[in-house]
Image (cartoon, rainbow, N blue to C red):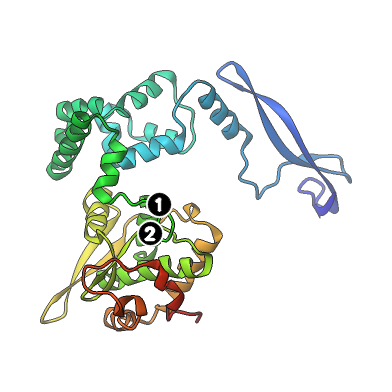
Amino acid sequence: MMKGVCPNCEKISELEHIITTEELNVKGELIKVKVEYYKCLECGEEFEDPGSKDDPLSKAYREYRRKYGMMQPEEIRDMRKLYGLTQKELSKLIGWGGATLSRYENGALQDDAHDRVLQLIKDPESMYRLIVKNGNFLPEGKKNRLIEELSAAVEEKCSFPNIFQERFGKYEPSIETGYNKLNIDKLFDIIKFFAKDGVFKSKLCKLIFYADFKHFKDYAVSITGSKYAHADHGPVPDNYEHYFATLIHDEKSLRVEEVNFGEYLGEKYYAVIEPELKVFSDSELEVLLQVKKFFKEYNATQIREFSHNERGYNETKVGDIISYEYANDLQIGYK
């Protein structure tokens, strides 16, 4: 029992929390799912928790997909991202309407015919043939990159996710990765988080470094599983140029603005797409906000000089990977 406001009688009353099983009709089949709701002991009415994200129909759809071996929404989205395609590009490639794929990635239940198409393009050889046949609308660089990587996957008889990992760096959990596997989605969303209001590339690299190392310092695990290298201008994510290029040219989620400083041009990045903050745990999001606040007034030169005083930077040389062992010596605190 708990006290709360009933939305029906609009009184503060005793509420009974009820957990039970219901059968929902999915394509003519009854699927059992657990449901939770409250009963007001004042008026007797039952109601769902308005703040809950627990959708019984969504759970029923998930169970139906599991039962019949269909792809779940996150599997569809992850597959598309592995290929480096936008929703619009993949939809055009397989001949679907613009909104169809978006609905499936957001939880709508796909029909059997569409699921067979999705299952088919999981296979690198099928996707290779499809791009060769129908992919002329893709940017030339993206099409050529996909053909090359898919061809390698077919030839080596390995999965495309493995080729994708090789492209970005296949890191096994170790002290160099903060005891975490490389999570490209989280890394890309951290980049978009810090670039939301515009940030220079040099500063962006440092912000990502401090976010991962600060989380390791506080919780003994990194956020992204990325490695960080010693560069002339400070610590940077290993392969960072590749990450940025993918977000700019393939994902179309970053745009670049060149800023003239007289003697040289600076690159300022702006996030075109909002970051998916729900991918982060509470502790990860807290650290991201702390790092953003700490360095809010720092320009690119100031944060570079600040990072040059880190023990992990001073005790390594250009090209070396900076171990997360140095996280305990970070200068960053709370502001």
- SS label for mark 2: loop
Name the residue nearer the viewer: 231 or 111.
Answer: 231
Q: Position of residue 68 (x, y in %)?
A: 50, 20
Q: Position of residue 194 (x, y in %)?
A: 37, 66
Residue hosting label 2 = 177
Look at label 2 and name its amino acid: Thr
Q: On residue 181, which mark appears?
A: 1
Asked if 111 appears above or below 246 in the picture, the reply is above
Q: Is residue 282 visible?
A: yes
Q: Are marks 2 and 1 in contact (CB under 8 Å)?
A: yes
Callout 1 crowding tier (Cα within 10 Å): few <14, some 14–19, many ≥20? some
Total of numbered circles in the picture? 2
Q: Position of residue 63 (x, y in %)?
A: 57, 28
Q: In the picture, residue 54 is in which quadrant?
A: top right
Q: On residue 109, which mark appears?
A: none
> Alpha-carbon distance for marks 2 and 1?
7 Å
Q: Is residue 87 visible?
A: no
Callout 2 crowding tier (Cα within 10 Å): few <14, some 14–19, many ≥20? many
Residue displayed at 50% across by 64% down? 220
Residue displayed at 50% across by 63% down? 285
Q: Position of residue 166 (x, y in %)?
A: 26, 46
Look at label 1 and name its amino acid: Lys
Asked if 135 appears above or below 243 in the picture, the reply is above
- Residue 103 appears left or right of 306: right
Residue that extends furthest to the left in the rendered view of this protein? 263
